[in-house]
Structure formats: structure tokens, C-alpha cells
Image: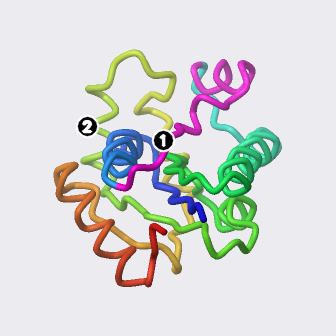
Amino acid sequence: MGYVVVVMGVSGSGKTTVGKSLAAELGAAFVDADDYHSPQSIEKMASGIALDDNDRLPWLALLRGVIDDHLATGTSLVLACSAMKQVYRDQLAAQDPQVHFVFLKGDYDTIARRLEEREGHYMKADMLQSQFDALEEPADAVMVDADAGPSEIVARALEGLVARRFRTS
């Protein structure tokens, strides 16, 4: 039986880096939700305009389809996805007990610095405040400090998942 771990947080929190490492540790596939944004959404964000719920709902439906495909075939998945609002997490999880969340929590200044140093990504540091404004911190996720190094974050995420009776088989 497969499972899904959604690594969530604002842009620049380390979702992709941590997600890839976590997937390798778990022997799971890795998917970056950014790869599923429509060209219109990417253009909007590249222009400095934050996405709204109308932009995100079709994207979230696509991601839920990816989750369904993995669960239907019994393959496991780590998905890097902002999942900033509870309603987004509800859509991704669809009350499926095999979908788990890891929240990479970081402070604004640290993440802003990371975004300023990042090159070649459409999400720029000047849009970070809109993500913090939209963020609804999850009550039901494994919470890990995004300021730690990637290997420490992965270790803490795994500890938190195991503590919640997460099973990889």
C-alpha cells in the first residue's frame, strides 16, 4: 500500500530540497507541485502577482490526481507543495489516511534571504509577504524548523512521521 507525504511551506522554505531527500530516504517518487502550474499562473507569479484561490483550485485538482494515481498503484510519493491554506490541504488529502503533511516552518527574514539568493525561479522575494499572509499553519502536520540543514530537517520529519504511526509499508 502506498502513501503520500506532502512537504509544505512558503516559497523558499526548502520544500524541493527536503522533499527530494525525504523521497530518497523513503524509496518514494518525488513530485514538485511547481511543475504543475499552468503557464498563465507562472506568468502571473513572474509578473509579481500572487495567485488567488481561483488560480490554485485547478492546480490542486491536478495534484490530487497525481496523489490518486500513486495511491491506486500502491506507489509512494513525496510531494513538494506550498499547501498554505487548510482548504488546500483538505483538497490534497481528501480525508485519505495515507496522506501526511510535513510543514517546513521558517521565519520571514531567513526565507526572504534565501529567495533573494535564488536564481532562475519565477517566485521572487517581493511576493513572500503574500505567502506569509495566506499561510494557515497546520495543526495536524509534522512541524519542522526550516532553518535547520536539509539532512537534519529530513531526520526530524522522519521522526515526526514515525511518532504519528506513519508506516512505509
Residue 73 located left or right of residue 54: left
Q: What amino acid is found at the position of numbered circle 2 in the picture?
A: Arg
Whether residue 150 is situated above or below residue 96 in the rendered picture: above
Q: Which mark is residue 155?
A: none
The circle on residue 113 is: 2
Residue at x-position 27% and y-position 63%: 145
Q: Observer-nearest residue: 36 or 46?
A: 36
Residue drawn at point x = 74 percent, y = 40 percent: 59
Q: Quadrant of the N terminus?
A: bottom right
- Say which residue appears at 59% left-offset and 28% top-offset: 35
Select label 1 or label 2 by which is in front.
Answer: 1
Residue 69: x, y in percent?
72, 47
Distance from Cα at disc 1 to Cα at disc 2 = 26 Å
| Residue 41 falls in image quadrant | top right
- The spot of residue 23 in percent (x, y) is 39, 48
Q: Nearer the viewer, residue 28 or 94?
A: 28
Secondary structure category for the residue under label 1: strand
| Residue 102 left/right relative to 31 | left
The amino acid sitting under disc 1 is Phe
Residues drawn in magenta = 26-46
Question: Residue 119 lies in magenta, yes or no?
Answer: no
Q: Is residue 32 left or right of residue 87?
A: left
Magenta region, mostly helix, strand or loop?
helix
Q: Which residue is mark 1?
A: 30
- C-beta proximity under 8 Å, tags 1 and 2: no
Report crowding for label 1: few under 14, some 14 to 19, many 20 or more residues within 10 A (C-alpha). many
Around disc 2, counting alpha carbons within 10 Å, would you say few (fewer than 14), some (14 to 19), or many (20 or more)? few
